[in-house]
Image: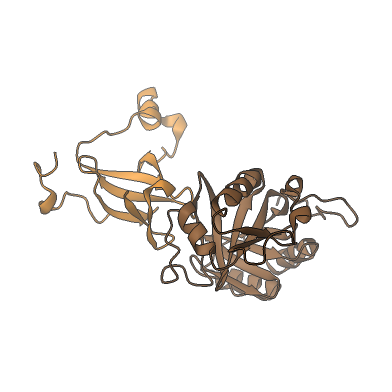
Amino acid sequence: MTAINVYQQRPEGGKAESPLFHAGLADAAGKGKATAGIQLRERKLLGHLTIRGDGHDAAFAGAVHKATGLELPGALTLVSSGESSLQWMGPDEWLLVVPGGTEFEAEKKLREALDGQHIQVVNVSGGQTILELTGSKVRELLMKSTSYDVHPKNFPVGKAVGTVFAKSQLVIRHTAEDTWELLIRRSFSDYFWLWLQDASQEYGLAVKA
Amino acid sequence: MLQIFCPHCGELRAEEEFHAAGQAHIPRPLDPNACTDQEWGDYLFFRDNPRGLHHELWIHAAGCRQYFNATRDTISYEIFETYKIGEKPSVTAKPKAAAPGEQA
């Protein structure tokens, strides 16, 4: 058995900066037009946990449900309850997103419930962030940016896919009728921020706090 | 653009989400120390380069990030099937319709 170093990666009172800290989203917030077709909000500093295990194993699915309160979703889907969500990332991989500050608690609960099983839980909070886009023109912006079909027939609410976007890759999550989330890597956040500003120019972009 | 069926995601995806990763079904010798240099060299470096049907390893790099196998015609680029690692291909000979001369 290897010893796993489980610790509070974002200590209370520590200074945390989101990947888009330098973009000054907080300063831009509220200054956009109310009629803007795209409203952008960074859902920053959330807890992201990657869970890996055998989804066909009832013991694994049961333990994840016990620890998170969420049913293990099937291919290309996302389940959420309140501020938490669980997303299918691959046949043996899921992503749990919890409110910032609770990820250590969530990880400990998962480890306890999954104890003895062949699994992996990794805190990847520092490696990625979520941009939430709302508004009537979001789907049009996505159509310009990705080759994936974002028509509601193919991309209903509750679906989440990893795909190519601009000249890079990210995960698109459809969380509500006019709300889409982009799960992006930390190192690509600046690129996507610049891309989104450019792509949303014709619809108007308003940043929300 | 080609649409490739990912057996893990269960739907057709754009070709740009995928990468080819060479020939499929190459088992690692169970006891590398018992191999002759030639056998080990064949395993490491030598790959088939057929004209026609080929079983290949692909990865859905931008999606679920999983490897899977594909049976592809190297002449017409037609992909006959994709299947998960560990499964056997169901297409092992070129279907009659795609016989020689068609798109050569």
Residue most extreme to the left: B101
Residue most extreme to the top: B37
| Foreground pick, B18 / B25 | B18
Residue B59 located left or right of residue A178: left
Residue A189 located left or right of residue A78: right
Asked whether the viewer can see residue B99, the reply is: yes
Relative to A36, does residue A190 appear above or below in the rendering?
above
Residue B102 located left or right of residue A156: left
Relative to B30, does residue B10 appear above or below in the rendering?
below
Chain letter tied to orange: B
The colour with which the image depicts chain A is: brown
Q: Going 48% across and 66% down the picture, which residue do you hit?
A: A75
Q: Indicate the position of residue A130 as horizontal and vertical percent values.
A: 65, 58
Q: Going 69% across and 70% down the picture, which residue do you hit?
A: A84
Quadrant hosting residue A11: bottom right
Q: Indicate the position of residue A86 as horizontal and vertical percent values.
A: 62, 67
Colour option used: by chain
